[in-house]
Amino acid sequence: MENQARASKPAAPVTPLSVLQRFRILIRTAQRHSQWIERQSGVTGAQLWALQELKESAGLRVGELANRMALHQSTTSNMVDRLETAGLLRKERTTVDQRVVRLYLTEEGQALLARAPSPARGVLPEALRLMDEAGLESLQSELDKLLRQIKNLDEGFGMQPLPFTE
């Protein structure tokens, strides 16, 4: 009976403010989860995600890791340096081309990942991963429209817009 009452209850009206509220909830949820990961494991959510990627694909290069995490290469490089300093990963140069650096988990990195809370990639990437293709396509399309609006507003105010590629 209670489920029927919920099902027949009209949905709240969609307004710019109601959508903004959902963005804020998403951001706070992701931040709270990342803080919880850090308290539980001693590394940031992004660092834990990087360790997970290296567990699944040992020997990635920094650029490959950056692509998997949708991060800028310099951001990823700094994170890798911190993880190396902490003894959680190691860098190895290939014998063929000394410029190529491959990344591997250390035993300490493997142990940290084994005892770390899930999902290692973070709650937002994991929720997106669990969405079906049609839902992802719809969400991306609507977010692209929103980003174009923001870009137009930024340009109208004479601001340098953030890079946005479709």
Image (cartoon, rainbow, N blue to C red):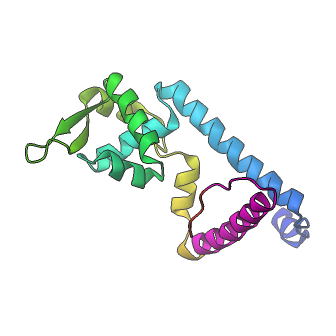
Q: Is residue 128 magenta?
A: no
Residue 26 at x, y = what percent?
A: 70, 50
Displayed quadrant of residue 92: top left
Q: Main secondary structure of the magenta part?
A: helix
Residue 148 lies left or right of residue 67; in this view the side is right
- Picture layout, residue 104 above or below residue 161: above
Q: Please give the name of the residue rendered at 53% of the width and 28% of the height, measured from the top-left corner.
A: 38
Q: Please give the name of the residue rendered at 24% of the width and 29% of the height, measured from the top-left corner.
A: 107
- Picture layout, residue 50 above or below residue 68: above
In the rendered image, the quadrant that contains the C terminus is: bottom right
Q: Please give the name of the residue rendered at 41% of the width and 55% of the height, measured from the top-left corner.
A: 67
Magenta stretch: give its range. Answer: 135-162
Residue 113 at x, y = what percent?
A: 37, 35
Q: Is residue 140 magenta?
A: yes
Residue 27 at x, y = what percent?
A: 69, 46
Q: Please give the name of the residue rendered at 65% of the width and 36% of the height, measured from the top-left corner.
A: 32
Q: Seen from this angle, which residue lies furthest bottom?
A: 134
